[in-house]
Structure formats: C-alpha cells, structure tokens
Image: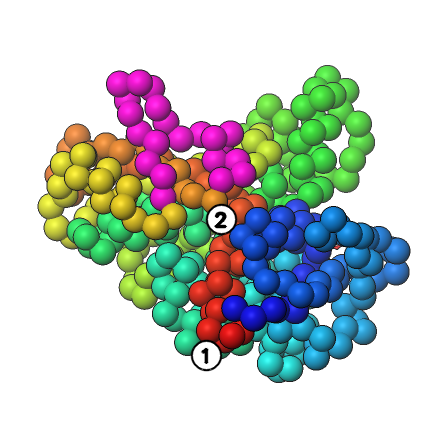
Amino acid sequence: MRGIRVAIVGATGLVGQKILQVLQERQLPVVSLVPLATEGLGRNVVWDGHSVAVEALSTMDWNRVDVAFFAASGEVSAQHAPVASGYGVTVVDKSSYFRMNPEIPLIVPEVNADAIRDSHLIASPNCSTIQMVVALDPIRRHYGIRRILVATYQAVSGTGRDAMTVLENQTRNHRHPKPVAAVYPEPIGFNVLPYCDQFGDLDYTGEEWKLTRETQKIFGSPIPVTATAVRVPVFIGHSEAVYVETESPLGSIDEIRALLRRSPGIRVVDDPTRGLVPTPLQAQDQDEVLVGRIRRDPFDPQGLHLFVVGDNLRKGAATNAVQIIETLSGRFS
Ligand SMILES: NC(=O)c1ccc[n+]([C@@H]2O[C@H](COP(=O)([O-])OP(=O)(O)OC[C@H]3O[C@@H](n4cnc5c(N)ncnc54)[C@H](OP(=O)(O)O)[C@@H]3O)[C@@H](O)[C@H]2O)c1
C-alpha cells in the first residue's frame, strides 16, 4: 500500500480516538492525518507523538485525503459522507445511517470482504452485530444456520464517551451521584437496563432490529435472528449469549472448537474443566472475538449455545473499519 492520506470525522470521540490508535498499531502507511470534530473549540489530537489541530468539517477540502473514517453521528454521515466519496475518497462509515441501504456494502472483512467491490462508501456494522457474525460465520459455512436467538450484555462505551462519564460517576458516587447529563432513562450504575435503544416494531428496540437486519444483509440470507439487547454496567466489551439452530447435524464439541480455532478473528476461550470462559475484561484491548461456553443443546441435536465477547471499540468499531481499508490495499498501491 502506498502512503495514504487519512481524515477521521469524530476524531475526539471514543471510536475516533481508537481508530488513531489502531492505525498506528497496524502500521498503515498514513502520510497525513486530518482530525475533524465540532468546529471552533481549538482542540488537538495526538498522532504519531505529535499534536495535530482538530479542523472543522464544514470547510473540509476532500481533495486533501484518500480515506475518511466517519465516527460521529448518523446526521453527520448523511450530510458529509456522500460529499467525500463524490471526491473519490474511500469512506468507511461507523454510523448506522447507510447500513441498510441496498447500494452500500455492509462489511465485516472476515465474512464478506468481497461485497465491497468498487464502492467508495462502505458501511461498518453495529458493534454487537460484528462480533456475532465473526463467531457464527464458520458455523454457518460448515453446518448452515436455520435460526439465531441472542441476548446481549452491552457495555456503556457503546453509547459513546458521555455514557462512560455517567457510569464512572454512578459507580464512584454510588450513594450521592453527581449531577451529570443523563444518557440513559434510568441509572446504569449497579443496574441492568433491558433495552439499548428506542422501542420500535413489535416492541423490539432499534439495537435488536440492527442485530436482525444487519446479520441478514452480511450473511446474504434471511436467517431469522431474534434479539434481546441489554445494557450492563461494564465500561468496555459487549457479551452475547447466542443460540443457533443448524441446518445439518452438529459435530462434536471438540470439532466445533477446532472449527472456530482455525477461523479468522476468533479466539476460543473454553475449558470448563479449568473454569476458562470469555469475559469483557479479557476481551478489552483485543482485536479477536472471544468465544466460549460452547455447548450442545440438551433437547435439540441441532441446537448450539455459545458465549461471544468482543471489545466494542476495537473489533466492534475501529479495528473493523481499519481492516476494511487494509482489504483495499490494491486501491492505494
Ligand atoms: N462506541 C462504540 O462502541 C461504537 C461502535 C460502533 C459504532 N459506533 C458509532 O460510531 C460513531 C461514534 O461513536 P462514539 O462512541 O465514538 O461517540 P462519542 O464518543 O460520543 O464521539 C462522537 C464524536 O463525534 C463528533 N461529532 C459529533 N457531532 C459532530 C458534528 N456535528 N460535527 C463534527 N463532529 C461531530 C464528536 O466531536 P466533539 O468532540 O466535537 O463533540 C466526537 O468526536 C457513532 O455513529 C456510533 O453509533 C460506536
């Protein structure tokens, strides 16, 4: 890959900051970086040991970059991402705005990198979708999947940096929380909220429908996916209890573990004899999706249970976005 010129929209946010880190860790040949965020606040971000001034999106000249990561809001992406891609910039959008647009590829490189084709605007899925499809794709390819049931346990960082502040405050000051702007309708400290988004069709939340529709688009198949998305007082790392019914009979648990071990982006953490299970603290700062608690269903020979954990800011966001650009290295050679 020749040197690439990069912009990050939302460079001051949780995902934007993580993209900066992942670009450096994975040694992408970035020759210039333009950080963008709300204008007029006189801020800087650190890139390659140097302080770089945050610039305004409204005056951005898209001729200055080859690649733009959008990690702000759906409204910002709706307004500015098509402008950037119109200049020939390869845009990877972290917002949900374009994900279900049939013209826009929705990409998890381990699963469907081929779907990018020559698109210059590429959507990266929701964090909870990404880790689930990485874990289930080998099962789908080997046994086929008839249906998926999933319950999530999602970290507050999935909501953005303000939610981290809220949980920090409610944890430190358990008895007398300091007044900070509400992010959730109810306290998240020492609590569990059985919704991650607004309620919608059939009383499922937006997050739950994202798990359904994004999974179907990525797998290219109308597999029924029924989700219950839950917010828990964890800072980083989403967990998911997943149940799948397969189309063909399952192999032994050892065969399934071996299948997952040789599949990209997965680390099997599953040894009941030693109490080895995946947890959000283990997944934090890891790019791999951790999979454990792998069990046959006691009542259905084609039923399989798994516990899937991933760092929502890494594979759920920044790493997936950076990997998308890595798969396009030919475009920048
Ligand atoms: N957090 C996750 O785990 C995760 C996972 C997958 C996808 N996403 C998606 O990634 C995006 C960013 O999420 P986040 O968690 O990083 O949120 P965040 O921590 O709240 O950061 C939001 C960023 O967007 C910038 N921004 C907001 N409005 C803007 C505007 N009008 N013009 C320019 N910049 C603007 C903010 O800049 P200021 O500093 O100027 O406010 C900040 O840099 C969202 O679309 C989210 O849905 C997040």
Q: Which mark is residue 237?
A: none
Magenta-drawn stretch contains 267? yes
Report the magenta residues as a range: 266-286
Question: In the image, residue 126 lies at what x, y percent?
Answer: 50, 54
Q: Which residue is mark 1?
A: 118
Label 2: which secondary element: helix
Question: In the image, residue 124 lies at what x, y percent?
Answer: 50, 60
Question: In the image, residue 183 lies at what x, y percent?
Answer: 69, 41
Q: Which quarter of the frame holds ligand 1?
A: bottom right
Q: Nearer the viewer, residue 301 or 52?
A: 52
Q: Is residue 246 above or below residue 333?
A: above
Question: In the image, residue 108 lies at what x, y percent?
Answer: 42, 59
Kindly tell me whether residue 217 is visible in this rendering.
no
Task: Measure how far apart labels 2 and 1 are at the Cα level.
Answer: 23 Å
Q: Residue at x 41, y 60 (%)?
A: 109
Q: Residue at x 67, y 31 (%)?
A: 167
